[in-house]
Amino acid sequence: MPDKAKTKAELLKATESLIDMATDSELTVLGELIGLQLLKACFIRRAGALGMTAEQLESARLGIEETQRKVMVLVQLLDETNANAIQAVTAPKH
């Protein structure tokens, strides 16, 4: 198992580097992705301990799925924007 402190330090360093060079759109997507992963992790770890009913669990699960769909749309838009930017830079100039 990896050293948690070392992994955390590496992730923080990488995240800080990404934040420094990211566009506003990239930061928005990064924030949404992190938020989604935290939501999923908290839900999975705490759902049973919260004493939620089956209906509440299902509602929370559906909410997470909807959030995931929204985040994936943002990721796809960002990927398309990046692909278009790369194509514009690499396209032959006449």
Image (spheres, rainbow, N blue to C red):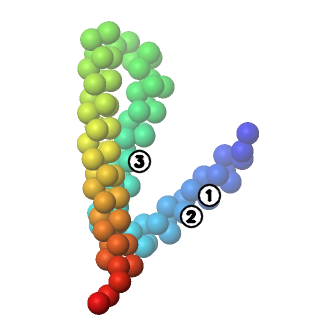
User: Which type of secondary structure does the marked residue at label 3 adopt?
Assistant: helix
**Which label is found at residue 34?**
3
Name the disc covering residue 58, or none: none
According to the picture, the residue beneath numbered tag 2 turns out to be 13
Question: Residue 89, can we see it?
Answer: no
Vertical arrangement, residue 53 with respect to residue 45, above or below? above
Where is residue 78, by image quadrant? bottom left
Q: Is residue 86 above or below residue 71?
A: below
Determine the secondary structure under disc 2: helix
- Which amino acid type is marked by label 1? Ala
How many other residues sit within 10 Å of disc 1, few (<14), some (14-19) or many (≥20)?
Answer: few
Q: Residue at x 64, y 52 (%)?
A: 7
**Residue at x 41%, y 20% (from the top left corner):** 47
Of badges 1 and 3, the one in the foreground is 3
Question: Neighbour class for label 2 at 10 Å: few (<14), some, many (≥20)?
Answer: few
In which quadrant of the rendered image does the N terminus lie? top right
